Image: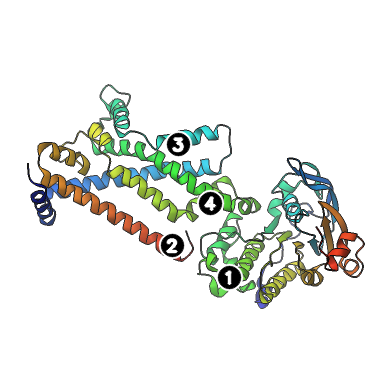
Amino acid sequence: MSDAAISLPARRAGTAHPQLLPLAVRDLVLRFGETVVLDGLSLDLGPKGCTMVMGPNGSGKTLLLKLLHGLMQPTSGRIDWAGQAPRAVTHRQALVFQKPVLLRRSVAANIDFVLKARGRDVARRAALLDHVGLAHKADQPARLLSGGEAQRLALARALATDPEVLFLDEPTASLDPASVLAIERIVSDARARGVRIVFVSHDLGQARRMADDVLFLHGGRVAEHSAASDFFPEPRSEPARDYLSGRIVV
Amino acid sequence: MQSIGEAFGLAIALVLSGDADLIEIVALSLRVSLTATALACLIGLPLGALVAIGRFWGRDAVLIVMNALMGLPPVVVGLLVYLYLSRSGPLGFLGLLYTPTAMIIAQTILIAPIVAALSRQVLEDLHAEYAEQFRSLCLTRLQTVQALLWDARYSLLTVGLAGFGRAVAEVGAVIIVGGNIDHLTRVMTTAIALETSKGDLALALALGLILLVIALGVNAAVQSVRMTAARQAYV
């Protein structure tokens, strides 16, 4: 599977696009009626690496990803992708959802759809499927794939757009260890090729393996944002300490 | 007037003999209704898709009108088309009244709202599943519509079937704009009505049997396609 990674074109860097990173988020608030989901959240993301977004359910991780990706509008606050608004840069990013949304087509047709929609060369499909270990399933119906295979197809489809930023919303939830490993390899390869990764996960082991920095959310705020090398041995915030020690954090 | 048993016997003999008049009537029925269904799909499917993905002022009113038009009375459609195509009507110069083309127009008007309303529901459900992914991929409206229509193709077959069923079984509109002229605009339903009124139950029953067989055959074919698609999780 990983042998084919070298056949993937490098991320399109140095094009006419202005820089996408660093990202600056300031005082982000998201309300649904009276319910405050994100409560004045601020953060900065540098140009490289993998940021693990962690925190208990309901802390706003998924919604934060959707806001950063431009799929939602905040109630107030500012999201600044190096001077550009989220909606203006959605096409330079990709998001893999926790439950992959696969088209009612073959595996190959799912990739072709994205390549054609983005004006890319359909000949890239073979390399993409090879890269995620699905070349032998190209003609199979996508919706009959196993959970791990479906998620790898969703990743291949995301990579087909040549994203500069790849958002991953718990892509390995409910998957077996082999599938988790396969997906982590694909993500690591993307990071090595310069794709900025923002990865939501509840899996501490995965966070330790993948993270360059950890963004820990609690109650719609950033409880802690620090380098992985600092976060795991010495978390600064109370919720993060409780979370890492296995205590229930609500 | 024949007894029912006698009429059935004569009807089956008529079908088996390959009666030329019978074949002509059946062929015209299929030509008119299939063409109307195809045209209604060309109009109704994109319309249904646009309403399914669109969020615009007055959308609820559009939905109400679309759904209400599903129940258009055929005789009213026939009358309106008649008024437009009659010699003194705005389209009278085309000389289409009492031709198969007029029948196709009437049936298209009758079933296009059915196709649009049913496809809107199918496509809206599918769009609810795909919408966030499509926005993430920054698809254009046209790309979204194309993708939805393709991915819902097997469900839309059933929508087309509903339209065809309505068209081929309809009598009110085609008798007004077609006139039930022998060898020109006589279709199965108008022939059944005429032969029944004349007391020739054999021909009426024969046509009725063929109508039922066509309905069953088309349904079976579509169901078979859908089942194959369902096995591949394409539905």
Image mark 3: chain: B
Category of crowding for the residue at label 4, using alpha-carbon neighbours closer than 10 angstroms: few (below 14), some (14–19), many (at least 20): some
Give coordinates of residue B194: x percent, y percent.
15, 37
Q: Residue lying farthest front?
A: A248
Label ID, residue B66: 3
Q: Secondary structure at mark 4?
A: helix
Image mark 1: chain: A
Q: Secondary structure at mark 1?
A: loop
Image mark 2: chain: B
Give coordinates of residue A181: x percent, y percent.
70, 75
Label ID, residue A219: none
Q: Secondary structure at mark 3?
A: helix
- Which of disc 4 and disc 2 is earlier in sequence? 4
**Residue receiving disc 4:** B126
**Residue receiving disc 2:** B229
Q: Quadrant of residue A127?
A: bottom right
**Residue receiving disc 1:** A146
Category of crowding for the residue at label 1, using alpha-carbon neighbours closer than 10 angstroms: few (below 14), some (14–19), many (at least 20): few
Work out which quarter of the rendered image holds the N terminus of chain B and state it. Answer: top left
Q: Are marks 3 and 4 on the same chain?
A: yes
* Amino acid type shown at disc 2: Ala
Q: Gap in Å between the C-alphas at discs 4 and 1?
A: 21 Å
Residue at 83% x, 64% y: name it. Answer: A243
C-beta proximity under 8 Å, tags 2 and 4: no
Q: Gap in Å between the C-alphas at discs 3 and 4?
A: 19 Å
A86 over B67 or under it: above or below: below
Q: Quadrant of residue A128?
A: bottom right
Q: Residue lying farthest top?
A: B88
Category of crowding for the residue at label 2, using alpha-carbon neighbours closer than 10 angstroms: few (below 14), some (14–19), many (at least 20): some
Left or right: residue A172 compared with residue B215: right
Can the viewer see residue B143 in this picture? no
